[in-house]
Every structure is written in C-alpha cells, then in structure tokens.
Image (cartoon, rainbow, N blue to C red):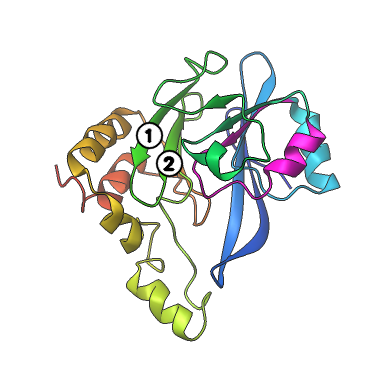
Amino acid sequence: MLVEFGSDIWIADGKVVSVAGFQYPTRMAVIRLSDGTLFICSPVAMDNNLKNAVDAIGMVAHIVAPNSLHHLFLPEWIAAYPNAQIHGAPKLAQKRKDITFDSELSDIPAPAWDGQIDQVMMRCAITTEVVFFHRASGTVIFTDLLQQFPKGWHKGWRAIVAHLDLMVCDEPTVPRKFRMSFVNRKAARAKLRKIYDWPAQKVLMAHGTPVETDAPPYLRRAFSWLSPS
C-alpha cells in the first residue's frame, strides 16, 4: 500500500525479512519526477496491490538500490519493469552478477533527477550508502544508516544485541556497528556537512519511524557522535 508522504513522494512498507537471524521491517520510497516518471528507492517485495498503486501514479523509470545490502527484491521489480533503468550502490554489481546495472550511484545525481533529488555517498566498512534529498518534499532518505526498532521487537539474546547496538532507542539513530565502521571520519564529516546544508523537513529510513518534524536538529542529534558541531 502506498502512503503519501509529501509533495510527489510516497512510501510503502513491505514484508519483514530475516538477516542473520534478525527480523527487519522494510520500507521503500517512490518519487514522481517532473517528467511524470517514477524513481523507486530501495524496493520492497512486490504484490499486485502495490504494483497497481505504483502504476496509478506514474511509469517506473528508475529502480534504485542505495546500498549494497538492499537488493533482495530487485529481480522482481526488474521483471515487472524491464524498461526501467537500474541504479546500484558502489560494489553492488560485483555482489549481484545476475543483475545488469545501468549505472553506479555516486555523489553526482543522474541527469534524469538532477535538480530534483540531491545525493551524498556515506562510505563505511560495512557498505557505501547513498543518502538522497528530495527537494520538493524536503525529505532526506536514508536506508540502513539510521534505524529504530520497537521495544520488544527482538527476543532473547537478539534483544540484548539490539540494545547494545543502539537499534532500540527513543528515535532512529545510527547503530553502533555502523559508527565503528566509519574508518575515514574526516571524509564522512565532509559528506555530513552537505546533508546538514539541505533544507530538510522530514527524514525517512528503511527501518524505523519516519521523522516528520524538526528534521535539522534531529539529524544533528543522530550524527552527534561523528560531528558534534
């Protein structure tokens, strides 16, 4: 089911997936570009209802995997939209040799969405995540760098790990394992300054409650461990 999140942007929550025994809720973003075509960010599992809802708002032209961890459902979207361009995060093409990617994402927006969606690569040892900013809605779109799970979501020893990893907090935050994996912090701070410069109004992530008010101070809290300024 698509839910409107702002001007020309929708979100859809997908099924829960298991990664290393941990259960993750999933979420994608759909952005309608100025030419009426759609930009699908981190697609979730497809079903007929979701496909019909997407088709009702525009033609899918771009399918985007913003980091090397979010690729599970690419094949079904590619099969449903064979004419769409497939854009992958750095190194994802090496991981998914079964998929033909049309481009590798970078710090520079593709011509198709330049001026409408800005982007910054945040590189750490776990993955390189491309963070997007949809200008029309003022939405910053993260994938895994920000996470939040409800209290009680994990059970047993996994609940202990999730707590220690900062996956269960009062608001979405950067898990401890990601914080530790930022080896080149000087470069990361430079990218973070670009994110701070965006006139953000809202913040989306794949795993966590969207932030719909006071986005700039929220982002500074979430990344205070990296850049206190």
- Closer to us: 93 or 19: 93
Range drawn in magenta: 60-81
Left or right of residue 89, residue 145 in this image: left
Which residue carries the number 2 mark? Answer: 129
Q: Amino acid at mark 2?
A: Glu
Q: Amino acid at mark 1?
A: Met
Q: Residue at x 66, y 31 (%)?
A: 100
Q: Residue at x 61, y 43 (%)?
A: 96
- Vertically, is 124 above or below 159? above
The reply to whether the magenta stretch includes residue 76 is: yes
> Dots 1 and 2: beta carbons under 8 Å?
yes
- Residue 94 drawn at (x, y percent): 54, 40
The reply to whether the magenta stretch includes residue 204 is: no
N-terminal-most mark, 1 or 2: 1
- Closer to us: 27 or 203: 27
Label 1, label 2: how far apart the Cα atoms are: 6 Å
Count neighbours of disc 1 (C-alpha within 10 A) and say few if under 14, some if 14 to 19, many if 20 or more: many
